[in-house]
Amino acid sequence: MEKKYVCDMTNGNAAGLLLRFAFPMLIGNIFQQFYNMADSVIVGKFVGSNALGAVGSVGSLNFMFFSLCMGLGSGIGVLISQYFGAGQDEYVRKIIANAVYITIAAGMLMSLCGTILAKPILCIMNTPQENFVDALIYMRIVCGATVVVAGYNMISSILRALGDSKTPLIFLVAASGINIILDLIFVIVFHMGVAGAAFATVIAQVLAMLGSIWFGMRKNPYLQLKKRHFQFDREIFQNSLRLGLPIAAQNALIAFSCVALQSVVNRYGAIVMAAYTATSRVEQLVQQPFGSLGTAVSTFAGQNAGAGRYDRVSAGCKVSVRIVLIFSLIMVIVMFLLGDKIVGLFVNEPEVIGIGAKGLQITSLMYIGLGLIYVMRGMLNGVGDATFAMINGVTEVIGRVGFAWLLMMIPSVGLWGVWYTNGLTWALTGAANVIRVLQGKWKTKCVIRSTEYPRVSM
């Protein structure tokens, strides 16, 4: 068996393990954002700011429909990491096999819902007429392929739960390059507009999913499954739902809060929509180190919780917080010095660039809160604290809806309230996560106990 495609995080230096795991994921996430940004840059430069605003306005909607699949994938990943940490290799394979049924069912359901509900949701969001048609086209194509997102997210969650963050990277980088090439061909050569950008993204996701599955089945011993592993297991299904649905609800609530804020953005017209889309793309890139570290912490926490090593769970969390603080301070400096140049990569209009640059300066002051959300949430999800995942999502809804409503009542704040809302929401949610971790209740949330199964080696 090729053990280089798995990583046992229950022994060894916590900082070294977290950084080695997070770095390939960071590279992969950055490439993923690059091909998301490629959509925005190419659409903004060659189709126009209205088209860019349309693409940006459905980003949160797409994420909302993806959230069920992503949550279930996370739930499966938590189960795998905990049983892997406990040394229960055969049961890990059963979990992976049963994940196939969950992925197909959730992916097909969300693909259907996203396609059917796209138009009425865009109407409810007060999407401007000049953006509506492009937004509808982009959303129907991307949401229609949610089953692909489910497949890639599930295989990535499985591999990462086993400590392999490199395999998803390999195929994501390749898919990113293909996505950018297809963007250029579909949008510039064939003049397909936002539809071309959407199809390019979907094709790239298909290739990343298929490549990861193929390589994983060939190289990873835990993906070399037998017929017996595919027998439906009610306990696995129930535990997957117990862990995954709260995370899915959390993701959906966060997406809903972003959709609610986007509807506020839409009221200010196409120029502000374009600026907000550009800053959102930049912040998605900034979030990648936080997201990669959060996923690393989740895997680390899951494996060590399964092995009963709660001291290592705490140690990993503390190391990650220090990393967040350093990176956040660096990003504040970058946004204040280079914000206008960064936004200028997406659009040509000076007014859009000016608004976007100031927006980045406002939100950068709250990046520390954003980083704490990712690290603390990753740790809590990894140990199986599913209840708080739902509370976490509710907190973000309260923050984005509440702050947006309050700030809109202050005339002097105006359109800047959109960016202040995001920053203050990060601060509020980050504080809630820190309080939950300090309470210590997470130590009782693991699905299994270290005494339930004796740890055995492969």
Image (tube, helix red, strand yellow):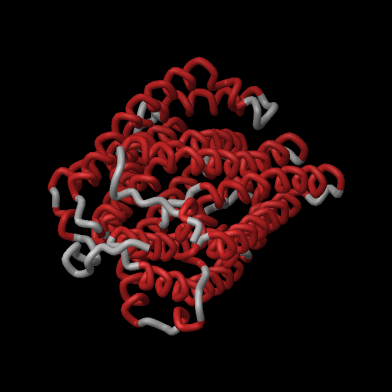
For the point 38% across and 27% down, which residue is it?
A: 328
Residue at 32% x, 27% y is 325
Is residue 141 among the parts visible in the rendering?
A: yes
Q: Residue furthest right?
A: 189
- The x, y position of residue 377, in whole percent, is 31, 48
Q: Position of residue 297 (x, y in %)?
A: 34, 45
* x 30%, y 42%: residue: 12
Total number of numbered discs in the rendering: 0
Nearest to the observer: residue 117 or residue 170:
170
Q: Which corner quadrant of the image does residue 245 belong to?
A: bottom left
In this view, 129 is above or below 217 = above
In the image, is 451 to the left or to the right of 210?
Answer: left
Percent position of residue 359, x then y:
48, 28
Vertical side of 418 occupied by 443: above or below: below
Can residue 119 be seen in the rendering of this structure? Answer: no
Q: Position of residue 232 (x, y in %)?
A: 42, 83
Q: Please give left or right for residue 391 compared with residue 134 in the image.
A: left
Query: 297 or 141: which is nearer to us?
Result: 297
- Give 38 or 310, whichever is nearer the viewer: 310
Q: Quadrant of the C terminus?
A: bottom left
Residue at (29%, 56%) from the top-left corner? 389
Residue furthest out toward the top: 337
